[in-house]
Image (cartoon, helix red, strand yellow):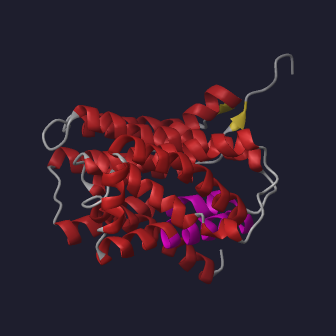
Amino acid sequence: MKPADVCLAVLVAVIWGSAFVLSRIALDELSPELMTALRFIIAAIPCLFVARPKVSWPTLIAISFTLFLGQFLAQAYGIAGGVPVGLTSVIVQSQALFTIAFAAVLFGERPTRMQTVGIAIAAIGLLMICGTVGYDFSVTVFAVLMLSPVFFAVGNLLLRRAQGVAMFDLFAWLCLVAAVPLLALAVAKNGVAPTWHQLSHMSLAVLLCMLGIGLVSTCFAYWLWGRLLRDYPAAQVVPFALLVPFVGSAASSIVFGETFGRLRLAGMLTVVGGIAVMLLAKRPQPLPEAGA
């Protein structure tokens, strides 16, 4: 990769890691549903200027509801429920484990030996983290948060159905598709008056956080990431995502003073280590067809 593109990949990781901190601040004033809806309303602004990509509505909705709506709503519920920001960033990145596992089951993409080792390592790390659940947040909240990497993984696989379209246009419309039901959910769950009160009494700090999450983290960073994936093999680009949990953990420690017990910290490092093994291993090979 060119040095400038390496810097862009690192920049994306820093933006995504910092977005977890911004989400935590925004959730002090906004409900998880409204915060997630605003994220995508802001990120969908480019839809005013770009046409809908040539992707069927069912495919567009399926990708949006998993990759965006499901993933980020579960994240918001987890953070609002007390899961530390640093831990949340690690859990979300475990999507690599689920992506490879689902691809093996659904598409016959047999994991390589090293990817299998990485899956085992990451699974052990998740079990270690599970051993710390129940002290500062509930098992239910942790279970909801674990839906985030699952939705993320399913969305990754569904994204294959949108090959050959402009990434910027696609992600803008994915944001719009997610924003509409999320706003409806916020109003239905919280009520019209409380929702309007949250919006009309939003502090400047939270407004800036939402602009950062919507425009910079969701719109700009995803566009950069899509451009890098277009110009370089995924094996060169995807490993930079390993920086996200480190940035998220470091930022949360600085901003919120978050600390982790030995078992949880060991589990987090084990998960990241397993993800590193998976991402740096060679791509899986499809299973041979019957009779071949």
Q: Residue furthest top?
A: 291
Magenta stretch prevailing secondary structure: helix
Question: Residue at the location (29% across, 38% down)?
Answer: 142
Question: Residue at the location (78% across, 63% down)?
Answer: 51
Does residue 118 sit above or below 85 in this rendering?
above
Q: Would residue 192 be counted in the magenta stretch?
A: no
Q: Which residues are magenta?
A: 215-241
Which of 66/92 is in front? 66
In the picture, measured across the screen, residue 289 lies left or right of residue 271, that is right
Can you see residue 168? yes
Which of 73/115 is in front? 73
Q: Residue furthest front?
A: 193
Question: Residue at the location (29% across, 62% down)?
Answer: 249
Q: x, y percentage for residue 222? A: 58, 65
In the picture, measured across the screen, residue 129 lies left or right of residue 55, that is left
**In terms of image quadrants, where is residue 27?**
bottom left
The mark total stands at 0
Which of 267/64 is in front? 64
Q: x, y percentage for residue 176? A: 61, 56
Question: Residue at the location (37% across, 50% down)?
Answer: 192
